[in-house]
């Protein structure tokens, strides 16, 4: 262990001792080493960027194809329902971590029932909504007809 510490100390102090004789570090040598290191790092980054682009390339969707994903509804992480059109037929598929499975083939003649989702207005309790409307109804309204706004930057 002491030999390793002695070797490390000697390795670190020898370059300093060599530069002490010349009066300081060689500026041109340091600049060349910095530029060489920069070129090496940029080269590695470019090579990794090229390889990532080649290995992780996703196939592009073709609009002229026979398969089209009509709608996707995410249910939970890694679980979703997909409505896919294949050659004029509609398929309801289940997509999960285990794989993709067919739930039902939807015929063109079948009607798909559209269920409207409740918006944010449905989340407000009716008592609160009535109180807010009562408060808003008691406030005076300051509305001016178009073309009759004041001189403070409005229409003349």
Image (cartoon, rainbow, N blue to C red):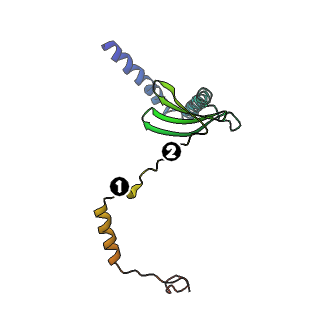
The x and y percentages for residue 104 are 52, 31
Whether residue 80 is situated above or below residue 139 in the rendered picture: above
**Frontmost residue, 9 versus 105:** 105
Question: Looking at the rendered structure, which numbered label has been put on residue 36?
Answer: none
Question: Looking at this view, is 49 or 26 the one in front?
Answer: 49
Tag of residue 113: 2
Q: Which quadrant would the C terminus be assigned to in this image?
A: bottom right
Residue at position x 68%, y 38% in the image: 63
Q: Is residue 7 left or right of residue 26?
A: left
Across and down, in percent, residue 105 comes to 56, 31
Residue carrying label 1: 123
Query: At numbered mark 2, what does the secondary structure look like: helix, strand or loop?
Result: loop
Upstream in sequence: badge 2 or badge 1: 2
Q: Residues within 10 Å of mark 1 (few under 14, many from 20)?
A: few
Please tell me whether residue 106 is drawn above or below residue 123 in the rendered image. above
Question: Element under label 1?
Answer: helix
Residue extending farthest right: 64
Residue 32 falls in image quadrant: top right
Residue at 41 percent of width and 52 percent of height: 118
Q: Residues within 10 Å of mark 2 (few under 14, many from 20)?
A: few
Q: How far apart in space, not on screen, are marks 2 and 1 (Cα)?
A: 23 Å
The x and y percentages for residue 14 are 43, 22
Q: Residue at x 49, y 35 (%)?
A: 81
Q: Residue furthest front?
A: 109
Percent from the top left, x then y, of residue 54?
A: 62, 27
Q: Nearer the viewer, mark 2 or mark 1?
A: 2
């Amino acid at each position: 262990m002491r030999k390793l510490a002695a070797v490390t100390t000697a390795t670190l102090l020898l370059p300093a001792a060599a530069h002490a004789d010349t009066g300081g570090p060689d500026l041109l040598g340091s600049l060349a080493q910095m530029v060489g290191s920069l070129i090496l790092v940029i080269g590695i980054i470019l090579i990794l960027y090229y390889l990532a682009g080649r290995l992780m390339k996703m196939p592009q969707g073709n609009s002229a194809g026979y398969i089209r994903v009509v709608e996707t509804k995410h249910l939970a992480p890694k679980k979703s329902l997909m409505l896919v059109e294949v050659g004029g037929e509609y398929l309801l598929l289940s997509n999960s971590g285990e794989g993709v499975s067919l739930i039902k083939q939807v015929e063109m003649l079948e009607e798909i029932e559209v269920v409207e989702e409740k918006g944010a207005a449905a989340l407000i309790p009716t008592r609160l909504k009535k109180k807010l409307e009562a408060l808003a109804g008691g406030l005076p309204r300051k509305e001016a007809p178009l073309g009759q706004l004041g001189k403070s930057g409005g229409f003349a």
